[in-house]
Image: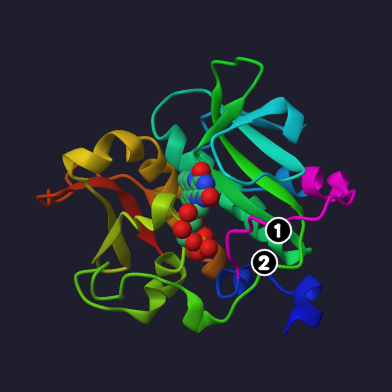
Amino acid sequence: MKANLFSMSLEEQIYLRKSCRKYVDDELDMDSIREFISTVSPLNDEINYYCEILSRDEVKLQTGWSAPYYLALYSEKKDNYLENVGFIFQQVSLFMQSVGIGNCWVGMGSVKEKNQDFVILIAFGKSNQMTRDLSDFRRKSLDEISDKGDDRLTPARLAPSAINSQPWYFKHTEDGFDVYQVKQNILKRQILKKLNRIDMGIALAHMYVANEKTFEFYQKRDFEKIKGYTYTGSIKI
Ligand SMILES: Cc1cc2nc3c(=O)[nH]c(=O)nc-3n(C[C@H](O)[C@H](O)[C@H](O)COP(=O)(O)O)c2cc1C
């Protein structure tokens, strides 16, 4: 499986990716990453965003590990910008994984040079430890993340999330799902406030990548309220 890694599609990465925390210090072809970023679909095309590639000396980290490079993500702060950043850059994460570049979202870090548009970092670099078997994913069951278990939700189920909190919940509609975010208890609420919204965008990116031709995201005005959850939006797949 590992030998074919470089020719695999983004969708295939969903089933073997893992957050990478061990890197080798090799140089990378940044042009292919920049080129891919320029082609990615957003969730909300009315929000401006940008990113830059930084070295480990240009970031502040509270992680016990580091990577040779960091993607610093910036966005205009409006509407669903956090979900939008998760959606866009999880596609970039899967792309990097598909060309043998390990990566990991980093909530516990920031940029040294202050910038009010800063949202989050993604660590990346060459690595030999960035894949696993499907049986090694620690995730909630399909029944726990939806009103009724449905294999079509497996790509979202396998998505990465801050401290593996997996805040997503899906309720069936005629042609897709209403998508909700779990309200965290008081202990976790503060730390996950921003990150869980990014996680929601990440799970939506997996649903998009797995249903590229048919995926649509929209927000209903008259969505059903569910106790313990907030409404993120709805998808057709
Ligand atoms: C928004 C976000 C922030 C994260 N922040 C960190 C972090 O600061 N440090 C870290 O080691 N891992 C971080 N992670 C990685 C998660 O711990 C990881 O995705 C989760 O435990 C599931 O493991 P997996 O990605 O290998 O499937 C983050 C993930 C996401 C999605």
Q: Are marks 1 and 2 in contact (CB under 8 Å)?
A: yes
Q: Which amino acid does label 1 sit on?
A: Gly
Q: Which mark is residue 130?
A: 2
The type of residue carrying mark 2 is: Met
Residue in the foreground of this view, choosing between 54 and 225: 54
Residue at (40%, 76%) from the top-left corner?
A: 152
In the picture as drawn, the residue positioned furthest to the left comes out as 227
Numbered disc total: 2
State which quarter of the image contains the N terminus.
bottom right
The percent position of residue 213, horizontal first and vertical second, equals 56, 66
Confirm whether the magenta stretch covers residue 90: no
Return the x and y of residue 9 as percentages of the image width and height.
69, 71
Q: Residue 159 carries which label?
A: none
Near-viewer residue (193 or 13)? 193
Reply yes or no: does residue 31 show up in magenta.
yes
Q: In which quarter of the image is residue 81?
A: top left
Residue at 34% across, 40% down: 192
Q: Which residue is drawn at 69% across and 57% down?
A: 22
The residue to which callout 1 is attached is 102
For the record, the magenta segment spans 17-35
Residue 97 appears in the rendering? yes
Q: Which of 201 and 165 is in front in this view?
A: 165
**Residue 139 at x, y = what percent?**
38, 70
Left or right position of 219 against 127: left
Mark 2 Cβ inside 8 Å of ligand 1: no
Please say whether residue 86 is visible from this viewpoint. Answer: no
Mark 1: which secondary structure?
Answer: strand
Type of secondary structure dominating the magenta stretch: loop
Q: In this view, does 20 lie above or below 46?
A: below
CA separation in Å, label 1 and label 2: 6 Å
124 displayed left or right of 74? right
